[in-house]
Image (cartoon, rainbow, N blue to C red):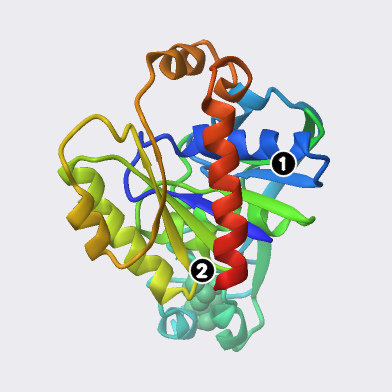
Amino acid sequence: MRIAIASGKGGTGKTLIATSLAVHWAKQGKAVTYVDADVEEPNGHLFLRPTFEKTTRHTVPVPRLAGFCDGCAKCQDACAFNAIIALKERVQVFDELCHSCGACVNACPHNSLKLQPRELGDLRHGMAKNINFIDGLLDVGEARATPLIEGVVEAADGELVIIDSPPGASCPAVTAIRGADIAVLITEPTLFGVHDLDLAVQVCQKLNVPPIIVLNRANLGGDMMDAIKATGAPLVAQIDFDPQISVATARGELAIDVVPGFADAIANIADAIVVSEVVS
Ligand code: SF4
Ligand code: SF4
């Protein structure tokens, strides 16, 4: 089962829940893979503290001129993303816009364009508390996160794969959620939280990934129950604010190990995920 832990906005406690679920299932002897797909600022490693065993550079193919160019601009015309322009006897490729489709390569009458690898960031594998750990670390200044997210998500397999997704409802989140069996959307009882939750639910529905909702810090903020119900996704668990969780998080500790009662809350969420996935 592939489980995307996602949220419409940042700071809702997504990584807290994702890492805690990984620890919960690992303690039950399940084969768990935790994937930190928030490649622009991965922080799952701060809590699970893996021992990294393998780091590879992740690349995407981009066109480079490797031969004669007469400036015909057929490559430019073939590109649907405005990622290449023809100049006199050379081309300019805008790597951040390139989707690696290869259309320009096929269009060149002189066969002068070749796809060559461009590095985006690190893809890291390790082990943490009997959890198979994978994350991605986008290079500083790199604009395209989605190819690395794809690489990180595709690298994961196993009985239970927990994908700690980037926040939001745009391409990075879509890339992480796509293909999951279920999405657990973490939200908080604020206007922003519920507004962005609604967007995240819509993304899941478009992707045919059934969403369920966990309301974090449920005893703070206002009464958002009607708004949460209006999203159409089931609310399966509520976690009240507990300063002990904040303290543990600030220390880089796993709240599931040190905060009384939190393990029970995570166990309830784990059960809800299994039940919801079976029902859907
Ligand atoms: S590989 Fe595709 S997206 Fe990239 S420059 Fe060529 S045509 Fe454009
Ligand atoms: S299609 Fe080939 S020859 Fe024409 S501008 Fe592009 S690289 Fe140059």
Residue 269, horizontal then vertical, whole percent: 53, 45
Q: Amino acid at mark 2?
A: His
**What's the distance in space between the residues labelled 2 and 1, CA to CA?**
37 Å
Q: Which mark is residue 99?
A: 2
Residue 254, horizontal then vertical, whole percent: 59, 21
Q: Amino acid at mark 1?
A: Trp
Cβ of disc 2 within 8 Å of ligand 1? yes
Residue 117, horizontal then vertical, whole percent: 68, 57
**Of marks 2 and 1, the one in the foreground:** 1
87 or 279, nearer to the observer: 279
Residue under numbered circle 1: 25
Is 238 located above or below residue 195 in the figure?
Answer: above
Residue 36 sits in quarter: top right
Secondary structure found at label 1: helix
Q: Earlier in the sequence, mark 2 or mark 1?
A: 1
Is 158 located above or below residue 208 in the figure?
Answer: above
Q: Does residue 137 show up?
A: no
Q: Does residue 102 show up?
A: yes
Cβ of disc 1 within 8 Å of ligand 1? no
Residue 88, horizontal then vertical, whole percent: 43, 71
Relative horizontal placement of residue 15, taking residue 63 as reference (left or right): left
Residue at left offset 67%, top offset 70% = 114
Residue at left offset 69%, top offset 22% = 49
Residue 197 sits in quarter: bottom left
